[in-house]
Each structure stands twice: as C-alpha cells, then as structure tokens.
Amino acid sequence: MFEREFITNPTKLEAVDLFNQAYAEQLDKNYDEAIRLYKRSIEIFPTAEAYTFLGWAYSFLGEYDRAIAECLAAIAVDSSFGNPYNDIGSYLIAKGNFYDCVRWFKLAMKAIRYEARAYPHFNLAYVYEKRGKFLEAAKYYGLAIKEQPNYSNAYNALRKLQEKLN
C-alpha cells in the first residue's frame, strides 16, 4: 500500500512496513491483528493514512464511533488527506445520520490530497436521493461519473434515478 523505495528514515520505514502488514491482515479480514499493527505503526510514526485505515478496520467491526475518532486523528495529522473526510461521512450514514454526513463529503471533495474524488460525490448523491432531493442526487451522480468515467455504480444509480424521474 505504502511505497518504501524513497523512504530513508528508518523509523518511518518500520512504520510503513507495519502499515503494509496491517493492510494485508485487513484484506484477509483479520481485523484484530490489523488494528494491532496499525496502532503499532502509529506509535512509531503517526500518519494520516494509518489513522484512517485503523478507522476503516474498526468500521468492519461495526465500531463507527471509534472509526470516526481515528479519522479525526488522521485529519489532525494531515488535514489535506481526503480519505478520512469521506470515511467519516460514510460512517455517519452507517449510523443512520443522513444530515451531518453532507459536510464531511463536501470537505472530502475539497481536499488537496485525494485520489478517489468520485466517492464523496457518489456518497453525497446517495444521501440526497435518500432524502428525496432527486435533482441534487442526479447532479452529484453525474459529478462522480465525471471524476471517474468508468464508475459503474454511479452510472447505474444515475440511470435508476432518471427512471424514477421520468
């Protein structure tokens, strides 16, 4: 997940190795071990990525409040990293909160360092659709497709929404 090749700091290199091990454990659904390794990585060298992925691991266990807390820690380390903003919004949706999440998706869209810009657009569209704001939903599904033209979930959601509106 993290590239090692340009890291010269041995402490950071150890933290990156632990992060990568944690990520592998998470992919194997060994969430307790992933959590342990992410925490160890953070102890050695805190990064926004490690906090965010630690939150993600907690979310798989249904521990959304802990996941949100880790994302807030990620933002404190690096406010330019977009993933934790989107993740907080997603965790709020999982908790049934379709209002407070909007702010977080909009912050994710504005984040300087974010490679998955289609996701907050899609998530915000989903929220607007659930709230009955169909034109707003259509707008954000379209923006998700603009950000990632091959995003089939956004394309399919937009088509279903258009069928509702016709």
Image (cartoon, grey):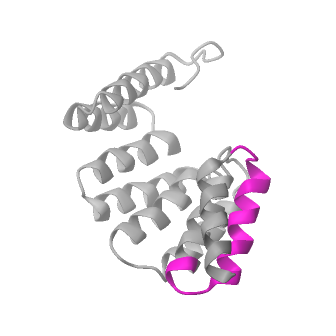
Type of secondary structure dominating the magenta stretch: helix
Which quarter of the picture shows residue 39?
top left
Residue 101 shown left or right of residue 161 in the figure: left
Outermost residue, right side: 146
Residue 53 shown left or right of residue 117 in the figure: left
Give residue 64's position: percent from left, percent from top: 30, 62
In front of the other: 6 or 152: 152
Q: Quadrant of the C terminus?
A: bottom right
Residue, x 56% and y 78% (percent of image)? 129
| Relative vertical location of residue 63 with respect to residue 5 in this rendering, above or below | below
Residue 108 shown left or right of residue 43 in the figure: right
- Highlighted magenta segment, given as a residue range: 129-150
Examine the structure image and report whether residue 148 is included in the region drawn in magenta: yes
Residue, x 50% and y 74% (percent of image)? 101
Which quarter of the picture shows residue 155?
bottom right
Examine the structure image and report whether residue 91 is included in the region drawn in magenta: no
In front of the other: 51 or 154: 154
